[in-house]
Structures are given as structure tokens and as C-alpha cells.
């Protein structure tokens, strides 16, 4: 019998160390290292080593030039959910969905599984956090009490897989959540790195063997990352985050990894009394309450996955009474804001050292692409000068450290979305308008931030199609 040893594993990143420490050297988290049981020697000693020395069975190798049919999909009918998953759930796939507590993960999956079951697919919803009566109560509130979804409340992984393997395997299974699952082959408590890793591995193996689409719900840390070892994200086929601010009714379903569809695709939902409603046109919704006559507001034409989205960026600058001015950002990268402020001060001569700066992306959407640099700079300049930007104008472009404005990708899709919503002007990088001869929009080309400041400070509201700001 193998000798039992003790190992110390970080509950945040899964790194193993031979001794306990207060701070994990891999991820830097404090008080996350827990002692767990292990087997000394691993596979390099004893019977396991002898077994590995023998020849294994031969696997079938095929040519890359062969043809394979696209995998079939289980379409739920919720267009926003199907968009993020790449067109529906693929049989035998494993998805990991994470989000803040109370953001609506269970509500979203209950609605999606009810819609899938209504299309004739067999669906099982396993809850490790709630009793069956609680799940039924939520279903009645959402108007899904009659949905043909089979419910279960269990945390023992052996019992769950044994039940699923009894008879015909279901088409889709939801495990809510993976942190509550445990297997009796390990001595550690549920939620530890070892239990989460082992439970996820068993569920993924069941999905590949049976053809069932498995959806795992995961908790997130205070930084917004899915809790547990990162190896779980490598096991599954798709990693999806359900985002949103508590003060906003909008929820964003974002795919950060997807083997069967585009990554960074988003779906937009609106939380209401009857659950989550789909938002087919998020641009119109994000701009619905915009006040165009106020300074410090600009409209950014962004790309989220394959979808163009127009969103309002709000900026406010105020004289600071603190020794270190405050920089508050919601929905954008704070480091990116610091870079834009530094370029405005060093290259354009705008003094922001004694100013508090507040930046907000309206609607609760989080923007990650650098194409928002020019829209953020325009909102800041508008707030400093007190002059509002034109109401019918969209802005996009990347700013370099030299102050130059660089072109961005998919400009045609951004401009088409702006035209569809009734915008007539666009401020964009120099040379970008030549790639699109559209008469519905009037282009103002900006080669550097100095030209943008000159335009906005002069209060010029007339179009300048096909000409650069430096030539005006």
C-alpha cells in the first residue's frame, strides 16, 4: 500500500508546496494554502510505475485533410444565449459559467434549460446549493412551473453520475455549482482545489463518453475570476462569464473561451420581475437615456465578439482637495485611463494633476478594447472645456504614447451600426474614411490628439468629410 503523505495546496490557484506558508508564491494570495492528503511517490514508484512501462493499446491516427461534419447543436431558442455558445449547445461538450453571487446565473440557466426542454430535449438540473422546493419556487416565479425539466438536489458526485448513467443519458445537465460537489475518493472538504479538480474531471469524462452537454456553474473570487484551479478552465470547452452591476438591470453574458464558436462574444439581458429578458438591440438600449447636451459625454462604437455595440462614455473632472487626486473608473481599465491622462498632459499640455477624474461606461457594460481611447479622450476634453460633443457623433480610435491616433479593426461594422441608429457624424483615425465611401456619414479624421483638442475647443460642429483635422 502506498504511503500517505501531506501536501499543501493553494485554494486560489491550485499550486502545491511541500510546506505551509502564509502567502502563496504563485498567485500572491494570503491565507489560501490548505493541507491536503496525497500519495507519496506518485506514479514514479511501485505498481503504477510497472504498469506504465508496458505498451499501451494503439490509437487510430487519421489524416488532417479528411472531412468532418459540423457538430450538431441543441438550440435553446434564447437567441442571446445561443449566440454566446456559438449557435447552441454541442453534444458531449462541457461549459463553465461563472459570475458574482446573486447576479442571475441560476435564473439564466433555468430559463435556458426550460426553453431547451420545451423543444423536446431531455434536461436535468442538479442543484447542490438549493433544495428542490427552492428551485420550484424560482420556476413558479419565472412562469416555468410546467417546464419538463427534471430536478435533483445532491452533492455526492458518485450518486449524481450513477443516476445519470441509469438509462438513457440526458441531452443536457446543469451542475449548480461545481464548488459544492465532492467525491469520496478524496479526504478533502467540498470546495477545495482537489475536490473541484476531481469533480470537474469526472463530469467532463462523463460528457465525452455519453454525449451529454454538461454546464458547470462556478463561483468567482473578489477579483472576478472563477474560483478554483485554472486547470478546470482548460478541461472544459467553453468558459462564459455572467457580468453586471448590481445597480443596473442589464446583464452581459460573455464568452472568454469557446472551442465551438467565437470568443469574446456577448449576449445582453435585462433583469425584470419575470426573470431575464433578451435585448436584441443593445446599442439602442445603452443609449436610450443619454443626455446629449451635457459636457463630458461621448458615444463609442465598439466591437464585442462579432457584434458592434454603441455605448455612452461619461467623464467628469473636478478640482481636487486631496494631495493625490482621485481616479475612479467603472467599466474600463484603470491603467488605460492613466495612460490617456498622461498623454493628454505630456503631449497636449492639458494640466490634470490637480483634478479628480471619474469615468463611467453607461449601462454596466465593460469595455476591453483599446479602440475606446479616442472616445475616452474626447469625453475628458469635453468635461475640461465644458463644451458638449455633437449629439449625432460616434468616436473610436486607439491612442499611442506619442499622441498619434491609430486605426482600429472592423471599422466598417462600427460605422454601419452608427448609421442604423441614426448617427450622421463620425470622428475616427486619419485615413480610415478612405476605406468606406458612405455618403450617409460625415467623417472627421483625426491624426493626433492635438487636432482633436483644437476641434473641440473651437466648438466646431460642422462636418469635414474626407479631410483631416490638421487641414482645417
Image: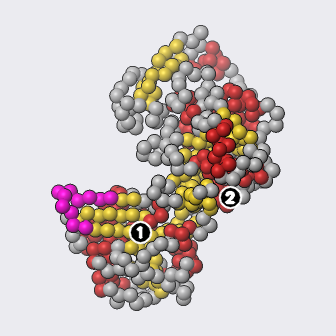
Q: Is residue 321 left or right of residue 10?
A: left
Residue at screen point 49% across, 22% down: 36
Quick one: label 2 or label 1, which is nearer the N terminus? 2
Q: Quadrant of residue 167?
A: top right
Q: Residues within 10 Å of mark 1 (few under 14, many from 20)?
A: many
Expressed as whole percent of the image width and height from the top left, the position of residue 13 reads 46, 36
**Label for residue 336?**
none
Which residue is tagged 1? 313
Q: Is residue 163 left or right of residue 308?
A: right
Q: Is residue 278 left or right of residue 445?
A: right
Q: Is residue 33 above or below residue 271?
A: above
Residue at screen point 54% across, 69% down: 285
Tell me the quadrant of the picture where the C terminus can be found: bottom left
Q: What's the distance in space between the residues labelled 2 and 1, CA to CA?
A: 29 Å
Q: Is residue 102 above or below residue 210?
A: below
**Is residue 29 visible to us here?**
yes
Q: What secondary structure is the stretch in magenta mostly built from? A: loop
Residue at screen point 54% across, 17% down: 39
Tally the numbered discs: 2
Segment tinted magenta in the rendering:
318-328
Expressed as whole percent of the image width and height from the top left, the position of residue 263 reads 57, 56
Q: Quadrant of residue 348?
A: bottom left
Residue at screen point 45% across, 88% down: 465
State yes or no: discs 2 and 1 in contact (Cβ < 8 Å): no
Depth check, front residue: 103 or 208: 103
Q: Quadrant of residue 132?
A: top right
Q: Is residue 237 left or right of residue 24?
A: right
Inspect the magenta stretch and tell me whether residue 307 lies in it.
no
Which residue is tagged 2? 78
**Is residue 53 visible to us here?**
no
Inspect the magenta stretch and tell me whether residue 319 lies in it.
yes
Amino acid at each position: 500500500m502506498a504511503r500517505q503523505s501531506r501536501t499543501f495546496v493553494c485554494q486560489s490557484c491550485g499550486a502545491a508546496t511541500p510546506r505551509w506558508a502564509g502567502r502563496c508564491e504563485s498567485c500572491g494570495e494570503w491565507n489560501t494554502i490548505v493541507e491536503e492528503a496525497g500519495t507519496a511517490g506518485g506514479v514514479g514508484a511501485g505498481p503504477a510505475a510497472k504498469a506504465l512501462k508496458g505498451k499501451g493499446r494503439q490509437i487510430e491516427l487519421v489524416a488532417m485533410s479528411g472531412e468532418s461534419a459540423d457538430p450538431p447543436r441543441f438550440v435553446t431558442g434564447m437567441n442571446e444565449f445561443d449566440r454566446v455558445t456559438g449557435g447552441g449547445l454541442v453534444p458531449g461538450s462541457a461549459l463553465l459559467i461563472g459570475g458574482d453571487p446573486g447576479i442571475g446565473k441560476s435564473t439564466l440557466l433555468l430559463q435556458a434549460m426550460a426553453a431547451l426542454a420545451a423543444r423536446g430535449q431531455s434536461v436535468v438540473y442538479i442543484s447542490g446549493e438549493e433544495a428542490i422546493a427552492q428551485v420550484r419556487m424560482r420556476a413558479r416565479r419565472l412562469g416555468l412551473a410546467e417546464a419538463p425539466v427534471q430536478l435533483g438536489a445532491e452533492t455526492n458526485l458518485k450518486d449524481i453520475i450513477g443516476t445519470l448513467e441509469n438509462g438513457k443519458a440526458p441531452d443536457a445537465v446543469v451542475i449548480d455549482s461545481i464548488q459544492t460537489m465532492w467525491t469520496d475518493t478524496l479526504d478533502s472538504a467540498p470546495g477545495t482545489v482537489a475536490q473541484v479538480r476531481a469533480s470537474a474531471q469526472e463530469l467532463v469524462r462523463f460528457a465525452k463518453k455519453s454525449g451529454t452537454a454538461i454546464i458547470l456553474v462556478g463561483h468567482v473570487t473578489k477579483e472576478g475570476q472563477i474560483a478554483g484551479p485554472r486547470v478546470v478552465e482548460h478541461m472544459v470547452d467553453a468558459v462564459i462569464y455572467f457580468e453586471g452591476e448590481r445597480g443596473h438591470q442589464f446583464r452581459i453574458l460573455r464568452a472568454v473561451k469557446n472551442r465551438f464558436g467565437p470568443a469574446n462574444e456577448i449576449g445582453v439581458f435585462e433583469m425584470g420581475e419575470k426573470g431575464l429578458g433578451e435585448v436584441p438591440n443593445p446599442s439602442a438600449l445603452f443609449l436610450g437615456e443619454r443626455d446629449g447636451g451635457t459636457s463630458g459625454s461621448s458615444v463609442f462604437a465598439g466591437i464585442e465578439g462579432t457584434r458592434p455595440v454603441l455605448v455612452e462614455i461619461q467623464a467628469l473632472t473636478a478640482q481636487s482637495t486631496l494631495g493625490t487626486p482621485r481616479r475612479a473608473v467603472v467599466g474600463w481599465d484603470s491603467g488605460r485611463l492613466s495612460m490617456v491622462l498622461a498623454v493628454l498632459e505630456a503631449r497636449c499640455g492639458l494640466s490634470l494633476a490637480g483634478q479628480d477624474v471619474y469615468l463611467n461606461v453607461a449601462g454596466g457594460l465593460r469595455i476591453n478594447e483599446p479602440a475606446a481611447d479616442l472616445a475616452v479622450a474626447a469625453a475628458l476634453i469635453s468635461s475640461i472645456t465644458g463644451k458638449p460633443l455633437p449629439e449625432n457623433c460616434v468616436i473610436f480610435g486607439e491612442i499611442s504614447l506619442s499622441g498619434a491616433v491609430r486605426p482600429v479593426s472592423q471599422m466598417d461594422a462600427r460605422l454601419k451600426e452608427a448609421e442604423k441608429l441614426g448617427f450622421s457624424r463620425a470622428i475616427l483615425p486619419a485615413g480610415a474614411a478612405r476605406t468606406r465611401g458612405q455618403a450617409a456619414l460625415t467623417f472627421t479624421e483625426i491624426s493626433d490628439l492635438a487636432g482633436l483638442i483644437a476641434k473641440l475647443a473651437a466648438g466646431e460642429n460642422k462636418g469635414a468629410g474626407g479631410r483631416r483635422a490638421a487641414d482645417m
